[in-house]
Amino acid sequence: MSLLLPWQQSQWQRLQESRQQGRLPHALLLTGPKGLGKGQFATLFAQSLLCQANNTDATPCGQCRHCQLFLAGSHPDISLISPLEGKKAIVVDQIRGLGQFMALKSQYGGHKLVVINPAEAMNINASNSLLKTLEEPSAETVLLLITHQPAQLSATIRSRCQEIRFGISETAENRAWLSQQLPVGADIDLLLSLAGGAPFRAIQLADEGLLEQRQTLFDGMGQLASIKLDPVILAGQLNKANPGWALLCLYFWVADMIRLTATKQTPVQLNSPDLRQPLLKLANQVSLVGLFKLQDRIRQAQQAFERNLNPALVMESVLMEWQNTFRIRKRKIA
């Protein structure tokens, strides 16, 4: 059974107080960066609304009939909506089916729960259909919309929901929890830095070997800068691995090189503090204007990649831009 995480305590207390006072909103928008367990929180909160026990902290007991049905995925009063297998979008038929679900009375006389994750995956027709539901909420129904990109939701949908924000917090309790999830000897500081402070993202980095992939990528980018490697060859290797992670690493590295070049403060706070000296060496080989152009190009590539616009060509174009940026500077020096 999912447990309440250390950095989610205040959000949990806020919602449970609203529940006790009879002021629980019919629609909640859970926002915050990836890797903070918002989906886990939504699941636990939904279960707590169905649980028959009266625990002092309102956490579900996991033993009553409602909890057993919930954990088995067969509770009739909850609907979980995500993109269908193999799809990226939540489509209108899924939301229309939600309307039918909400029109029925609770089979157990309590709450009816709907969890939409990720909410930004709804296409325009699905969003419009959900808006009709939000405008006419049924009694005892609670919708939980989960997103790390709230700006992608329509302003009207956001205005119909009460936002519950989850943020990055660096506390001893959080670090203690994370240390128990990571392999012995893991560099927690580096993992948290690369994960933007998000604990679950840090765990993913360690579990999926992304640190090793990152080092291999950095070595390859150094060879590109030295004109010792064909960008098409490296692009083919990256597209077989994790191209999204590769683009994120590139963006962070260019941002760090800009900081190292543009500021005279010491020390400069970096996304990749372990690569400070190699990044400084690369930064000295290219102009600041070139770095800003390269950063813009990488961001455009990330957006194109998210839209699934020919990932192979996207990666090739970025790596060619990287190599050309360094080649231009070398020509000027020569």
Image (spheres, rainbow, N blue to C red):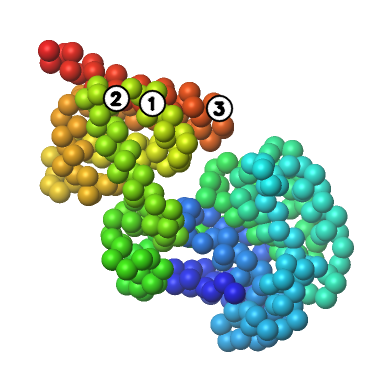
Q: Quadrant of residue 108?
A: bottom right
Q: Give the Cα distance between marks 2 and 3.
A: 25 Å
Q: Position of residue 153 (x, y in %)?
A: 61, 43
Q: Residues within 10 Å of mark 1 (few under 14, many from 20)?
A: few
Q: Secondary structure at mark 3?
A: loop
Q: Nearer the viewer, mark 1 or mark 3?
A: 1
Q: Along the line of sight, which residue is nearer the eye, 209 or 66? A: 209
Q: Which mark is residue 100?
A: none
Q: Along the line of sight, which residue is nearer the eye, 56 or 189? A: 189
**Where is the C terminus found, in terms of image quarters?**
top left
Q: Position of residue 272 (x, y in %)?
A: 27, 47
Whether residue 204 sits left or right of residue 54 in the image: it is left
Q: Which mark is residue 233?
A: 1
Q: Give the Cα distance between marks 2 and 1.
A: 8 Å
- Whether residue 122 is visible, yes or no, is no
Q: Earlier in the sequence, mark 1 or mark 3?
A: 1
Q: Position of residue 180 (x, y in %)?
A: 38, 72
| Residue wearing tag 3 | 309
Labels 2 & 1 near each other (Cβ < 8 A): yes
**Residue at 19% in and 32% down:** 282
Vertical placement of residue 178 versus 31, above or below:
below
Whether residue 227 sits left or right of residue 321 in the image: it is left
**Residue at 40% in and 38% down:** 246
Q: Which mark is residue 229?
A: 2
